[in-house]
Image: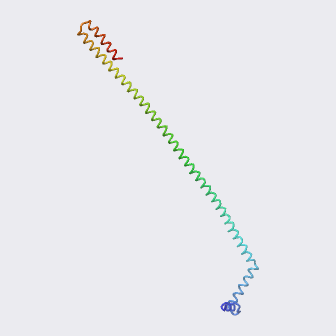
Amino acid sequence: MEYFAEMLHEVFDPTGPEFYILIGTLIFVGIAWKMGAFGQIGKGLDARANAVRRELDQARSLREEAQKLLADYQRKQKEAEAEALQMIEAAKVEAERYKAEQIAKIEDFVARRTKLADQKIAQAEASAVAEVKAAAADAAVKAATSILSSQPAASASNLMSAALNEVRAKLN
């Protein structure tokens, strides 16, 4: 407290420089007040506060708009992901359908080829049987001819009838 009292004494002592600094400051403040400097300072501070308030409002509205855009893009991203999953599922279904079609076509092709091969084998067997029968008939005729040429005519006719009946029996 003594320090404060001593300081007040120095400020209000007309012989010290602090007194004149106080008087000059008071005169300056009085002139500034009369000239309206405080009003101008207040107006400037109010204008600055209003500008800051507008900037804050603008920043707030920009933030809200950015949040809306973010939500919109997130929604669109989810929709795109769902659509992509649907496309993948559709592609899988289509691939399975195509696979089944191709397997059916291949099985049909194999069945037709197998049937054709079986027909060719049956034809070859029939042809081979016919050739064997023809060869057997030729051999029988040759054998009959050689036997008949060495036998007398009466027994040759009996033998010929018997051989022809035997060939007929074997061919049927």
76 versus 36 height, above or below: above
| Quarter of the image where the C terminus is located | top left
| Quarter of the image where the N terminus is located | bottom right
Q: Residue at x 45, y 35 (%)?
A: 107
The reply, left or right, for residue 77 in relation to residue 17 is left
Q: Residue at x 70, y 87 (%)?
A: 22
140 versus 91 height, above or below: above
Q: Residue furthest top?
A: 154
134 versus 34 height, above or below: above
**Closest to the observer: 132 or 59?**
132
Q: Residue at x 63, y 59 (%)?
A: 67
The location of residue 35, given as percent across then percent down, is 75, 78
The location of residue 99, given as percent across then percent down, is 48, 40
Q: Residue at x 73, y 77 (%)?
A: 38
Q: Quadrant of residue 132?
A: top left
The reply, left or right, for residue 158 in relation to residue 8 is left
Q: Quadrant of residue 150?
A: top left
69 versus 9 height, above or below: above
The location of residue 171, given as percent across then percent down, is 34, 17
The reply, left or right, for residue 151 in relation to residue 126 is left
Q: Quadrant of residue 55?
A: bottom right
